[in-house]
Amino acid sequence: MNASRLGLLLASGLLLAWRACVKPPTSLWQDWIAVLGLYLLWRPLWPEKRGRASADAAVASFLMGVYVAGQFPQAISVFGLYP
Amino acid sequence: MILGLFWLGVANVSAALGAHALLRRLRTGEPSVDLVIFLTARLFLISSTVLIAGVGGFVSGPALGWTATIILAALLAAGEFRRVPRPPAWQMPIALKLAAALLLLRLVLQVWLFSPHLGDALAYHLPKIGEWVRAEGFTREMGLHPHVTFPAGFELVETWWVVFLRHDLLIEMAGVEFLLVAYAAILALGRRWGLSDLERHLAALLFVLTPGLHFGGTSCLNDTPVASLAVATFALVAYRAPTAIVLLAVGLGTGVKATYVYTLPGIVLLAYLCRKSLPLRASSPRIAALVAVGALVVGGFWYGRNLLWYGNPFYPVGTPGYADDPIAVQAGPRLTSLWGNFSDLVESRFYDRAAAYGANVDYSAGWGPVVFACGPLALAASWGASPEVRRLGIAFLLSLGSCLLLAVHDPWALKYVFFFPAVLCLAVARLCTTQKLLARLVWAGLAYGLATTCLPYDLQSRHLGILAGQSWRERTALAFTRGPIAEPRVACLGGFRANAYLLYGPDFSRMVVYLRPRDSDELVAEMRRQQVRLLYAVPASAHQQDLLDECLRDGRLRSEGGAMYALP
């Protein structure tokens, strides 16, 4: 394992630990840092290329869903479609 | 009006051809850097022209139009137009070309239909343009907002877009010019990262569609110009462009807003990290040095003026009592601001769920869905892949940190870091090269971005209906709250909440008299002396409120509805 991967592992481990300390466990699933930290902890261990692209897209799709669920009501409010 | 359109056309062709003539002397040989230099040189020529006209007292359509005509004639006589190259043949798929064309078309529509509407612009940035256009030169009177003395580099470009028509119909074009600079800067950074044309244009589109930056381009605020010039400076430094050319961007950026300076630590670090790369050279180092000096003068002008007028280049920052002002900006670094801004960014504002998109990004970051969902992931995934990615990533992070350290912790602080999503957009585009599934998600995010950046929260569909229902000559956001003002003169009392710019009218035909009375007698006496019957008052202090109440109680003023009052 090269230094860059080791650094990434360490950083994601620290991020996860931080979020676990400051956020209630029930809300961690929609915390972007926790989701990303968990994924990046696991990503370097994944065999090169095999399935990684699908996993990247899955994580990004999940985060996109979290974002849109919160932002969409605001986005349509400017068109008078949301109270 | 026809003559105004003619002057506008001639002046813009002249500025573009002049910028091209300048580019031939500054050319580095790297096409993507040369495009950034061309656009920045055009802004430099426009800014310096309006600055000279402002000092010289000839800010008028005919005066600037004739000047531009003479310059254009000289450029044509020198055969400059024959040296203009063909536009580059970028290799892009049709879908991306369509998205770019759609975005451009929508920007044109936004410029046409939008009218200055955002509180900060109406109270602080634009009243000075009203004064300059009416007086045909710079004036000491610039309005009642405490920040009217701040640098006005962006207002120079806005003045350019209003002076020929003597109308603010196209004022948002100034912001669009800076969005183009941002686009070109991303193309250059993408090339530095070795991205293909497709990936570079995808990154650039993603960046200019980040909601905060995008709406900043059509809201007459100067945070988008600052972000664009910051990214342009990063691009020039990443390529090791000559120092004089980097100073061209630094000079313009410093003159737009002091928050540009907050990004410099990262830019300096990037220069250090890239010190071993092959440097670019300007075709004429002497002309480049002259342009650098000119840009520093243009940028430094406002600080020098404030030093001369008030004895403080950053006036009113640092003056006694200023820190207690409700809208005071922070002077110097503050660790509590760093922590507050950072913690708000990562805990809540990154989600953009507290408010609809807008240029002021209230309690939000305004970075959009693609940056949120894919940006950090893509940057982390690309981190080990290339030293160029790491250098730029570290430099952007340092600039982000220094901005968060120096910007006051308030609901709008993240408008000062609109530049940061640039590195995330580049990383996303880079990752899309190898990941088709992710690329599809990014396209979906791009479509979401296009659909949700039609209207900002402070210009909702009903407001747009009102604007579109007016003829272009009369189009004004004043109609959101009241009917047209018949008086040729209006007095204004207030401060940071008084939308004074709307009083001038879109064609600057109305005189605005700013009042700073000590008591109610002086308020009425000054109105009578100036022969003004109508008063627009939005008191900014308990003292101003008392004056107004006293006049209303005594019958010396009567309410006309809203914030309007009249002498009996």
Image: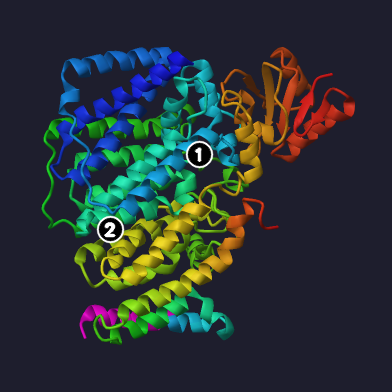
Q: Residues within 10 Å of mark 1 (few under 14, many from 20)?
A: many
- Amino acid type assigned to the residue bearing label 2 in the image: Glu
> Is B432 located above or below residue B177 in the figure?
below
Q: Is residue B284 left or right of residue B530?
A: left
| Residue A13 magenta-highlighted | yes
- Front position in the image: B567 or B461: B461
- Name the spot of residue B452 as percent of width and height, x first: 52, 54
- Name the spot of residue B117 as percent of width and height, x first: 59, 38
> Is B72 located above or below residue B554 in the figure?
above
Q: Chain of mark 2?
A: B
Q: How is the image coloured?
A: rainbow
- Residue bearing the label numbered 2: B199
Q: Chain of mark 1?
A: B
- Amino acid type assigned to the residue bearing label 1 in the image: Gln
Q: The residue tagged with tag 1: helix, strand or loop?
A: helix
- Name the spot of residue B439 as percent of width and height, x first: 34, 66
- The numbered mark, 2 or 1, whose residue comes first in the sequence reads 1
- Residue bearing the label numbered 1: B110
Q: Residues within 10 Å of mark 2 (few under 14, many from 20)?
A: many
Q: Is residue B14 left or right of residue B132?
A: left
> What is the magenta range?
A1-15
Residue at image location 35% in from the left, 56% down from the top: B422
| Residue B271 visible at all | no
Residue at image location 52% in from the left, 38% down from the top: B316
User: Do callouts 2 and 1 point to residues on the same chain?
Assistant: yes
| Residue B373 magenta-highlighted | no
* Residue furthest right as drawn: B554
Residue at image location 24% in from the left, 43% down from the top: B246
